[in-house]
Structure formats: structure tokens, C-alpha cells
């Protein structure tokens, strides 16, 4: 028989068929199937784990094959499946050879026989269930991660969590005798959120910048891309980092997808715990991610870090921001090739990385939020007079060209902020600003309207994802609104994409107002959010 293992690769990973053959010859272990150094080193870990667990390692020539052989395998997650495959071939678990080949095993082995946690357990279980695998053995420390999918009502599967090699062997004996693993303890799992809305701040803490706050509300409701530019200290970053506090929760399907990607990438952060693992995907409070992720990489990030890739393809920041927000602070400071590479994912909502082994598709349905100074010195649009800007026109144009017109055209909302209307903390103003809870209530209502409007057949759930045919179907305009839109398109020389962008934003604004028809006020507000931003001098008062 063979045992199924798992290797993280791309956004889905690969199911690995672990087979063992014993033959006469000098005792030793050979591993075939394009294994990397860590996988080949499992020979010594498995042998020592057998001995220290009181098990007899076969005194034969052992050949272990990892199929498919043409794909490189890396990491130590194949230790436990290799060990159990050797047990099966050596007859240490009677009856296992006749058992249906529906068993997936995950885990790294220490020399003592202890089973260590591995990354990507939720993704592995999802892939296994999709292939009809019914039995799973996972590390004890990954149990909560596996339970998320295994205990769903529609999952007819059985699992056991082990902390050592002898426990795994005992589980296999019970499986062959009873056809199922022993009933596990009914664990309760709390929700782990990558984005902690309670710690990201509240809109009420920032006074002023009402136009920017309104733009963030529209962006959060419809999933629109946004650029905010202006003077340092005006509150660009402060408010952008508070956008998680007004976002609607993910649906159950979106939560599973986002959790799977983060599990595969090993991006969970332990809270108040110490771990000696090479990753931090283990938590006693593991469960589905229900809040949209918020990712804010530093501007020194590489293209592989933002987009994904590497020697073994792994999700990048745009995939980790799937169904959430990617915030690029100081956007012109990012490398030009990184910024321009965002154009295709923003259109296609996925990224295709082509390698010699074949193309790998990574999900990238994210909302882009960028913040930028209007000029390199930052004085343009600040409290300083415009003449005191230290930058030449050539330097300002070079600074703005880093973002580029092609990327800007894919940004629906552009908001200039002035230092003269800078953000004030609530402690320094008597003005009572609207709280995030009040704004979030409107956003959730608008998102619910969109989810009911776009059925599964549409393949989308937010206004910003509508195609031209869907815009025509779902954006009915009143006659006066259509006249205002046509006049603005002619006067401002909007492109076709800008025209559709205004309609999408107007649809979101109408949803926030709980209106079925798009009215003139909705169109005019959408035009005001779209008309600026192509020129950095738009930050100056007109």
C-alpha cells in the first residue's frame, strides 16, 4: 500500500504518494522522487525515532519512493508518513497492507520519536478531502487546525492527533482492527483573527479629514482601490491603518479560503507563547480567520515577497491579503517593478507564476490602499507655502511616475489631503468624530446588499469586481444621473476604465444609502473621488 503525504507548493500544495519496498542487500535507506536535503535527512531521523520508540527498524535495503517523482519535495513534513510506510512494508502493523489507501499522514519526527508540528495542515486536509481521503493522522499541536475542516457536518472523515511515533503506530493498529480511529476528545476552538480590529484603532480617535474618512467607508463597502496623497502628518497612514475596524466579516467560504492560504504560508502569529518551530502556525486558539486580513509590507520588500514565488512557489503579500486589504505606505518608495507588477493581479484577481515545472496560480482578490507624499520633500500641500517646496518640477514628476498612470487608472478613489486640514487626535479637539462602529454598521449593510445581489452564478461578491456586462445589469441610472455622468466624462476626458470605475463607486454609494437606483448625487460624489490624483499638484487648494 501507499500512504499519502503533503508538500506545500503554490496555493494548493501537492499530495505525495509515499511507497516503500524492502529488498535483499546491504541495510540502508534510499529515497527517490526528487527529494531535497531535508527530505533525504529523514533517513537518519526515522531510523533513530524507530530505535528510541522501542521499534525494530527492518534490516533490509529500504527503497522509499515519493510520487510524483518529477516535482521537488522539501521540508520535514514527510518524516512521519515515511516512517509509517516503512512499518507497513515491514509488517509491523498487521493488516495495514490490505487497508484501503485512504490515509493521509502529516508530521516531522525528532530523534526521540516525538512528532513536531508542520505548516499547511489545513491546506493538506482540504486537499485530502477533495481527493476522497477519509483518514488523517496529524501532529497533536496541529489538531485544532485540522479540526476546522474535519468536524464540518459535510465531512465524512476520521482523524487522530499524535505526539509520538509509537502513538501513530498504535493508531494504525486500531485503524486496521476497527476501521476507524478512536473518537477524539471534542475540542473547543476559538477564533483566531489575523487582523485584530480591537487593536487597530478607532476612526473617532482622528478628528478632521472627513472626505478621507468617507472615501475609506466607500472603499471598505465596495472593495474599491484607494490612493491618498498629501503632506506628512495629515493622517494618511493613521486612518488607513484603521480600515480593518470598519470592514465586514468574511463569509464562511471566504474564511476557509483565507485560513487555508495563511496555513499554507505558515503566517500565524503566536500570542503570548514561545515556540521553537521554524514557523508559527500553531496556536491553541486556532480556528477560521473571520476578519479580512490587513497586510502592510515595508517598502523595501522584494517582488517575490509581494507577489509570491521563490525556489518553491509560496504565496506572497497579495495572496495573504486575499479578500482583505494590501496597504502600501509610502507607495512611491516601493520598487517600480513591484508596483507595476500589481496591475495584472488587480485586473485578474489572481497571479500566474510560470516555472519550468508548469504554471502555478495564486489567488489575489485583494483591495489595494496606497498612501504617498505629493513630493519627495513632503512640503507640497503642507502648511508651508507651495513656493517653499524644496523639490524641482522634474523631481516631483519623477516621484509621481513611480506609481505610474497605468496603475493609477486601476485605482477608483483618489483623495488629496492637506496639512491645513490635518488629522487631530480626539484629545486635542472638542469635535466629536464618528466612531468606527457607526461606520461599520453602514458598511456591513452595504456588503449584505451586494452579497444578496451577486449570486454564486455571478462569481463575485463586491461592486468593484463587476464586469462591463454586470455594470450594465446592476447599475440602473436615473435620467438626470446619466446626463451628469456623460457630461463629466466629456469634460474630464475619462477613459473607459474610469467611466466604469465611476459607475461601480456610484453603485456602492447608492448601497450605503440603501437606494436601488443610482441618483445624481451618487454619480457626482463618485466623480469627485475619481477626478483627482493624476497630477500631484492636485493636493494644492484650487
Image (cartoon, rainbow, N blue to C red):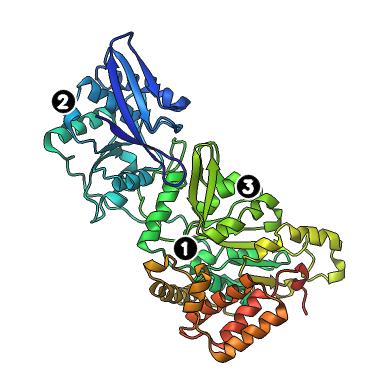
Contact (Cβ within 8 Å) of mark 1 with mark 3: no
> Which numbered circle lies on residue 248?
none
User: Considering only vertical position in the picture, is 427 above or below 524?
Assistant: above
Q: Residues within 10 Å of mark 1 (few under 14, many from 20)?
A: few
Q: Which residue is mark 1?
A: 198
- Which residue is at the far left? 178
Q: Earlier in the sequence, mark 2 or mark 3?
A: 2
Query: Which is more toward the observer, 478 or 397?
Result: 478
Q: Which residue is mark 2?
A: 94
Q: Nearer the viewer, mark 2 or mark 3?
A: 2
Which percent across, then down, holds residue 528?
65, 79
Secondary structure, mark 1, is helix
Q: Residues within 10 Å of mark 2 (few under 14, many from 20)?
A: some
Secondary structure, mark 2, is loop
Q: Residue at x 50, y 80 (%)?
A: 475
Residue 209 in sight here: no
Q: Residues within 10 Å of mark 3 (few under 14, many from 20)?
A: some
- Which residue is at the far top? 26
Q: Earlier in the sequence, mark 1 or mark 2?
A: 2
Q: Nearer the viewer, mark 1 or mark 3?
A: 3
Query: Which is more toward the observer, 310 or 374?
Result: 310
Q: Quadrant of residue 2?
A: top left
Which percent across, then down, holds residue 372?
69, 62
Of the 4 image quadrants, the one containing the N terminus is: top left
Q: Residue at x 58, y 49 (%)?
A: 306
Of the 4 image quadrants, the one containing the C terminus is: bottom right
Query: Which is more toward the observer, 61 or 151?
Result: 61
Q: Earlier in the sequence, mark 1 or mark 3?
A: 1
Q: Which residue is mark 3?
A: 301
Which percent across, then down, holds residue 201?
53, 65
Amino acid at each position: 500500500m501507499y500512504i499519502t503525504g503533503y508538500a506545500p507548493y503554490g496555493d494548493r500544495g501537492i499530495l505525495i504518494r509515499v511507497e516503500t519496498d524492502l529488498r535483499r542487500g546491504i541495510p540502508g535507506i534510499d529515497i527517490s522522487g526528487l527529494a531535497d536535503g531535508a527530505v533525504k535527512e529523514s533517513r537518519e531521523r526515522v531510523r533513530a525515532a524507530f530505535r528510541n520508540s522501542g521499534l525494530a527498524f527492518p534490516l533490509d535495503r529500504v527503497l522509499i519512493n515519493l510520487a510524483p517523482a518529477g516535482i521537488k519535495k522539501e521540508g520535514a513534513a514527510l518524516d512521519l508518513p515515511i516512517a509509517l510506510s516503512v512499518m507497513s512494508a515491514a509488517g509491523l502493523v498487521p493488516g495495514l497492507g490490505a487497508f484501503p489507501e485512504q490515509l493521509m499522514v502529516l508530521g516531522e519526527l525528532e530523534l526521540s520519536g516525538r512528532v513536531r508540528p508542520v505548516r499547511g495542515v489545513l491546506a493538506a486536509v482540504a486537499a485530502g478531502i477533495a481527493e476522497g481521503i477519509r483518514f488523517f493522522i496529524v501532529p497533536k499541536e496541529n489538531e485544532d487546525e485540522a479540526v476546522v475542516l474535519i468536524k464540518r457536518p459535510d465531512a465524512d472523515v476520521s482523524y487522530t492527533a499524535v505526539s509520538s511515533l509509537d502513538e501513530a503506530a498504535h493508531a494504525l493498529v486500531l485503524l486496521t482492527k476497527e476501521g476507524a480511529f478512536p473518537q477524539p476528545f471534542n475540542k473547543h476552538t476559538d477564533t483566531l483573527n489575523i487582523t485584530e480590529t480591537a487593536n487597530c484603532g478607532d476612526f473617532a480617535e482622528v478628528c478632521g479629514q472627513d472626505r478621507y474618512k468617507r472615501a475609506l467607508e466607500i472603499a471598505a463597502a465596495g472593495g474599491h482601490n484607494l490612493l491618498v496623497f498629501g503632506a506628512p502628518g495629515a493622517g494618511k497612514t493613521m486612518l488607513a491603518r484603521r480600515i480593518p475596524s470598519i470592514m465586514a466579516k468574511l463569509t464562511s467560504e471566504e474564511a476557509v479560503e483565507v485560513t487555508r492560504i495563511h496555513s499554507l504560508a505558515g503566517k500565524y502569529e503566536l500570542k503570548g507563547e514561545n515556540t521553537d518551530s521554524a514557523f508559527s502556525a500553531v496556536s491553541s486558539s486556532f480556528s477560521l480567520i473571520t476578519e479580512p486580513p490587513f497586510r502592510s509590507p515595508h517598502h523595501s520588500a522584494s517582488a517575490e515577497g509581494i507577489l509570491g514565488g521563490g525556489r518553491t512557489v509560496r504565496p506572497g503579500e497579495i495572496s495573504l491579503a486575499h479578500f482583505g486589504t494590501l496597504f502600501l505606505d509610502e507607495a512611491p518608495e516601493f520598487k517600480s517593478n513591484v508596483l507595476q507588477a500589481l496591475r495584472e493581479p488587480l485586473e485578474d484577481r489572481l497571479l500566474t507564476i510560470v516555472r519550468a515545472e508548469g504554471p502555478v496560480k495564486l489567488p489575489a482578490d485583494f483591495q489595494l490602499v496606497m498612501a504617498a507624499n505629493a513630493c519627495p520633500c513632503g512640503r507640497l500641500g503642507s502648511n508651508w507655502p507651495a513656493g517653499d517646496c524644496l523639490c524641482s518640477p522634474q523631481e516631483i514628476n519623477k516621484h509621481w511616475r513611480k506609481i505610474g498612470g497605468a496603475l493609477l487608472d486601476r485605482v477608483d478613489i483618489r483623495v488629496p489631503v492637506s496639512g491645513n486640514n490635518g488629522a487631530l487626535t480626539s484629545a486635542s479637539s472638542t469635535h466629536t468624530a464618528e466612531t468606527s462602529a457607526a461606520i461599520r454598521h453602514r458598511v456591513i449593510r452595504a456588503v449584505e446588499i451586494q452579497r444578496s445581489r451577486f449570486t454564486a452564478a455571478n462569481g463575485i461578491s463586491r461592486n468593484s469586481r463587476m464586469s462591463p456586462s454586470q455594470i450594465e445589469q446592476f447599475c440602473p441610472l436615473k435620467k438626470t444621473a446619466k446626463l451628469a455622468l456623460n457630461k463629466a466624462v466629456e469634460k474630464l476626458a475619462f477613459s473607459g476604465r474610469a467611466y466604469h470605475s465611476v459607475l461601480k463607486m456610484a453603485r456602492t454609494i447608492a448601497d450605503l444609502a440603501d437606494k436601488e437606483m443610482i441618483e445624481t448625487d451618487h454619480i457626482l460624489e463618485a466623480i469627485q473621488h475619481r477626478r483627482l490624483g493624476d497630477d500631484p499638484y492636485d493636493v494644492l487648494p484650487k
